Amino acid sequence: MQRNLIIEVSDTTGDAMKTKAGNIKKIFFLCNPIALNFAGMKLTSSPSQLFVYGSLRKGFHNDAYNYISKYFTFVCNGKVKGILNDMGSYPVATPSTGNFYIIGELYKINSREEFPWAIAQIDDYEGVNVEQDEQLLYKRELATVYKDDGTATQAWMYWYIGDTAGKPVIPSGDVLQYLGTKNYNTPHKWM
């Protein structure tokens, strides 16, 4: 199976990050799916997958999950290297190279053609696209997801880029488990 990969490059000289409007060209390449061997695990690349750990998980049963289930299909449970913090009104994930994991769910897009539109809607929900007067708190990046079957894959994930100093760490790395241990008499504000 082949995929179209779109790469934008600048025809200006110097630092590639300093492109000027009108100097960007689109180049289309056909490439085969990527398969790598990573620490003894088969690692497959699928940029049309999404890893979720918080309010987008099926256990929350909120409107955002209803949206995800229209455009994405649940693949399996998984984990990524990272740390979860309780910010009070929501959980946040930050990357880690240590032996800390965030538990979540892996989804794949139902139709590759809809992926750019569907992920843009989730970007809006997660606050990746902010207004000029708002502070950017999240970024979407590819992360290695370790699946329950012992394989690993790449999926998009939202990482928090704000300050977590002094905020409680969720030791299990699992938001649903964490909320279950809190014994809330009323629904938690994350739900």
Image: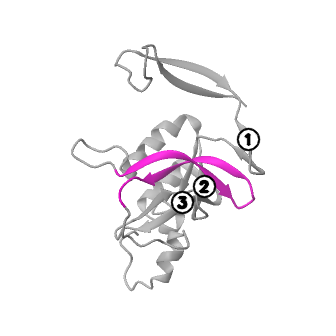
Q: Which residue is mark 3?
A: 82
Specify whether residue 124 is in view: yes
Using the image, tell me which numbered label, if any, was put on residue 36. Answer: 1
Span colored in magenta: 137-163
Q: Nearer the viewer, residue 190 or 94?
A: 94
**Main SS, magenta residues:** strand
CB under 8 Å between discs 2 and 1: no
Spot occupied by residue 2 in the image (x, y as percentages of width and height): 69, 28
| Residue in the picture at 57% in, 56% down | 97
Q: Earlier in the sequence, mark 3 or mark 2?
A: 3
Q: In this rendering, would 87 be left or right of 77?
A: left
Residue type beneath disc 1: Leu
Specify whether residue 61 is in view: no
Q: Earlier in the sequence, mark 1 or mark 3?
A: 1
Residue 102 sits in quarter: bottom right
Magenta span contains residue 146: yes
Quadrant where the N terminus lies?
top right
Spot occupied by residue 74 in the image (x, y as percentages of width and height): 61, 56
Q: What is the CA distance from the residue labelled 3 to the residue labelled 2?
A: 16 Å
108 over 97 or under it: above or below: above
Q: What is the CA distance from the residue labelled 1 to the residue labelled 3?
A: 22 Å
| Residue in the picture at 34% in, 43% down | 129
CB under 8 Å between discs 3 and 2: no
Q: Earlier in the sequence, mark 2 or mark 1?
A: 1
CB under 8 Å between discs 1 and 3: no
Magenta span contains residue 106: no
Q: In this rendering, would 61 be left or right of 90?
A: right
Q: What is the CA distance from the residue labelled 2 to the residue labelled 1?
A: 19 Å
Residue type beneath disc 3: Gly
